[in-house]
Image: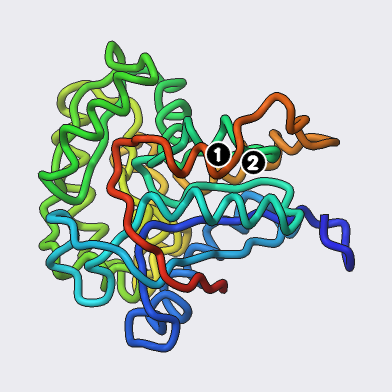
Amino acid sequence: MSETSDRLRILVTNIPTAMEHAASGEYLKKTLVPVTQSAAALTHRGRAELVFRFASHGFRHPAFECFRYLPELNPHAMIDAVAWGEAQGFDAAVLGCFGDPCLADIRRASAIPVVGLGEAALRAAAAHGPFGVVTPSEFLLAPTRHQIHALGLSAQLVDVVVGSEPGDEQEHALINATSAIEHFCSASRRLIAQGARAVVPGCGLLSPALRMAPGADRQWPDGLCEVDGVPVIDVFGCAMAEALAAVRPSPQPAAQRPSWAEISAAPGEVPKVEPGAFWNV
């Protein structure tokens, strides 16, 4: 907990990379983080202090090449970020990417609870029965299905579909969510027609945009919480609830954990790219 209050300190690690004072860094500081903070606060209600940590360097991925501000990502940097958070005394960490990169390895090494954004949301969706996922890119279809299979939830999956919003407009959803909401509703109705009883926005950018509806609050004053009566899973809300519940009174003993160096050096599914300098919001 913070030395100046009884609020829990939760670190949110992120795969988008940016130089802190570049246009991309300003977008993260002035747009992505404030909207996501507001979405998370609907669940933690002042019980937690969130710090967002970003790496400066990454690599381009086909799913994000059309982005103006965030075309580069660095999933492997999440390992370094959580190691830093543990050393700094954070109470828990949330991987702020729906795909939960490196989650299993990070959990093995971490002395503090680590919550996967996608894992928390998908389990919440499955509690409703059959569910569907709207992902922002065709490049994420197979990884999302694999993620669901690994969680043992494939039998409840109706489908994973790609949202119809153009890729170059997805970042703008955190400024004005009108178009994103309309496109998401359209995709959701395809899943609902197939029997989905819950719909998951499969993206760490899309989820807070839908929940807070920036620039669209007149039409959606409470954000987008349902489509035709079918609940839209609050992805960051699920992660916050899990993080708050998972905080342990004392860290896991080091003897039971591999070192961070071992985890970082081990072969993995994501490329290892030098992260450059880290910075926080």
Q: Which disc number belongs to residue 243?
A: 2
Residue 41 placement, left or right of 220? right
Of residues 157 and 268, the one drawn nearer to the viewer in this rendering: 268
Q: Amino acid at mark 1?
A: Val
Circle 2 Cα neighbour tier, 10 Å, few/some/many (<14 / 14–19 / ≥20): many
Whether 173 is drawn above or below 26: the answer is above
Occupied quadrant, residue 149: top left
Give the image location of residue 132, x and y in percent.
Answer: 26, 30
Q: Quadrant of the C terminus?
A: bottom right
Whether 160 is drawn above or below 50: the answer is above
* Residue matched to label 1: 115
Number of marks present in the image shown: 2
Of residues 189 and 245, the one drawn nearer to the viewer in this rendering: 245
Circle 1 Cα neighbour tier, 10 Å, few/some/many (<14 / 14–19 / ≥20): many
Occupied quadrant, residue 172: bottom left
Q: Residue at x 30, y 43 (%)?
A: 270
Whether 21 is drawn above or below 180: the answer is below
Residue 144 placement, left or right of 115? left
Give the image location of residue 101, x and y in percent.
Answer: 38, 41
Give the image location of residue 153, x and y in percent.
Answer: 35, 17
Q: Which disc number belongs to residue 235?
A: none
Of residues 178 and 23, the one drawn nearer to the viewer in this rendering: 23
Q: Residue at x 34, y 69 (%)?
A: 57
Q: Quadrant of the N terminus?
A: bottom right
Give the image location of residue 53, x and y in percent.
Answer: 53, 65
Disc 2 is placed on an element classified as helix
Q: Residue at x 71, y 54 (%)?
A: 87
How far separated are the C-alphas under marks 2 and 1? 6 Å
Q: Residue at x 28, y 70 (%)?
A: 70
Contact (Cβ within 8 Å) of mark 2 with mark 1: yes
Disc 1 is placed on an element classified as strand
